[in-house]
Amino acid sequence: MKITYDQEADVLYIELVHKQPFDTIEIDPDTYYEVDEEGRLLSLEILSASKKYRNFDKIDFEQYLKIPRKKRFSRTKLNKHTAV
């Protein structure tokens, strides 16, 4: 896991797994997350982070993330399309 904050750009980036993303999904205009081919969360990017959070050490990401279920990938469907 790697957490970086670019103060000049005011961007908080949380990388859970270093891997090429399959898709980037917008949660809101300032928040994005990336997933791999199986729908596993790889990273989270929060723009204008200091406007949303004053104390980064007290962020409750589980509460904030509320990732929409309809955006998740089905392993069964994915395997059918990628099977050789």
Image (cartoon, rainbow, N blue to C red):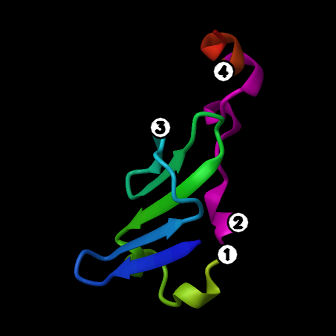
Specify start and end residues of the magenta stretch as a single range.
Answer: 60-77
Label whose residue precedes the other's in the sequence (4 or 2):
2
Q: Are marks 2 and 1 in contact (CB under 8 Å)?
A: yes
| Cα separation between marks 2 and 3 | 22 Å
In percent of width and height, residue 51 lies at 39, 78
Residue 37 in the image: state x and y as whole percent: 58, 34
Q: How would you rate the neighbour count of disc 3 (Cα within 10 Å): few for under 14, some for 14-19, many for 20 or more?
A: few
Q: CA distance from mark 3 to mark 4?
A: 13 Å
Label pair 4/2, CB-CB below 8 angstroms: no
The three-letter amino acid code for the residue at tag 1 is Asp
Which residue corresponds to mark 2? Answer: 63
Closer to the N terminus: mark 1 or mark 4?
1
| Residue at left offset 70%, top offset 37% | 69
Q: Which mark is residue 23?
A: 3
> Which residue is labeled 4 in the image?
78
- Residue 28 lies, with reference to residue 3, above or below; the image says above
Which residue is the extreme one toward the right? Answer: 76
- If the image is split into quadrants, where does the C terminus sit? top right
Q: Which mark is residue 60?
A: 1
